[in-house]
Image (cartoon, rainbow, N blue to C red):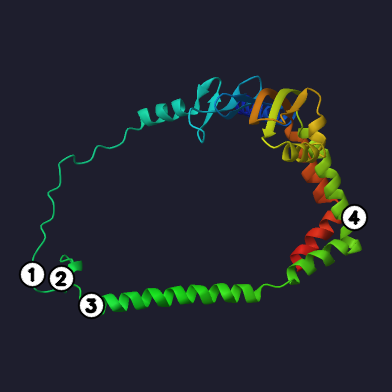
Amino acid sequence: MAVLFAILKGMGIFLLAVLAICLLLLALAFFVPVRYRVTAVTTDKIRVQYRISWLSGVLSITPGIGEEKVIIRILGIPLEVFRRIGSFFHPHKTGDKRKKEPEKVLVTTDYRDERVKPNPMSESKESQETHTEKTKKTKKKKKTKKKRQKKNFSFEKFSSIITFMKDPANKRGIRWIKKELLDLLCYIKPDQVKAKIVFGTGDPCTTGWLVGVVSMFPAAYIQGLKLCPDFEEKQMKADGYAKGKVRLIYFVRLIIRGYLDPDIKGLINYGFGK
C-alpha cells in the first residue's frame, strides 16, 4: 500500500506541476503585452518597417529582405533553423537518380493512338472555322450573362440594409458596436509617436484641399506627429516611428461581452433569420 500511495503522490505532484505551468503560460499569454513598433524611412521611396515582440523578444516577428517575406524568431533564432534541424533528423529518401530515356514518338497512320499528336499545320479550314464559331459563341454567352447580371441588379439589398438599420430592435446593438470599435481604436493607437511627414501635389489648390481633408481626422492631431504641406513641389517624405502595446485579455473580454449582450444576440438572430 505504501508503494501505491507513493506512486499516486508522485502522479499528483506531476499533474499539479503541469497544471501550474499551463496556468502560467495562459497568464503570460493574456496579460503580458504584445509590443509593436512601426518605422518609416524615406530614401528613394517610403519604406515601412515593423517589429512585433512578446515577452521581451522571446517571440518576435520582423520583415525579411523581401517585402512579402516575414521572419519569425523564437529566443532570437529564426523559425527556419528549427525546421532544418527537424529535416536533418528525418532525411528525405534518395530516389533513383538515373536519367529516364525519352519516350519514342511513333509515326503511324492510326490517329486513334494517344501517343501520336496531331499536326496543327495539317488542320483543315473547316476545323478552323468551327473553332472561330465556338469562340464567338462563348463570347456571346459571356455578354448575355453580364446583361442578365445587370438586369437582376436591384435596390432590394440596399432597402433591406436600410430597414435593418432603422429597426429599433437593432439600433441598440449597432450603437454598442460603434462604441466598442471606437474604444478598440483608442486602445490600439500607439503610445508614442515621433514622425514628420512632408507632402505636396505640386499644385497649391489641390495641396490645400488635401490639408483640409487630412485635418478632419483626429489622427492628424496626435502628439509628436508633424504634418508639413509643401505648396510648391510635388513630394512625399515620411521619417519617424510609432510604438505601442496591446494585451490579448482585452480582445477576450470584448468577445465575451459581445456574446453575453442581448442586443448583439438579437442582431445575430436577425441576420441568421434572414
Q: Amino acid at mark 3?
A: Lys
Front in this rendered view, residue 11 or 168 = 168
* Quarter of the rendering occupied by the N terminus: top right
Q: Secondary structure at mark 4?
A: helix
Residue under label 4, please give it: 172
- Residue 244 lies left or right of residue 88; in this view the side is right
Task: Provide the residue designation for mark 1.
Answer: 108
Q: Residue 113, which numbered label?
A: 2
In front here: 108 or 203? 203
Residue at the disc numbered 3: 125
Q: Please identify, in this view, whether the residue under mark 1 or under mark 4 is nearer the observer.
A: 1
> First in sequence: mark 3 or mark 2?
2
Q: Earlier in the sequence, mark 2 or mark 1?
A: 1
The residues bearing labels 3 and 4 have C-alpha atoms spaced at a distance of 70 Å
Q: Quadrant of the C terminus?
A: bottom right
Q: Are marks 2 and 1 in contact (CB under 8 Å)?
A: yes
Q: Local crowd at mark 2 within 10 Å, few (<14), some, or many (≥20)?
A: few
Say what amino acid the circle numbered 1 marks. Answer: Thr
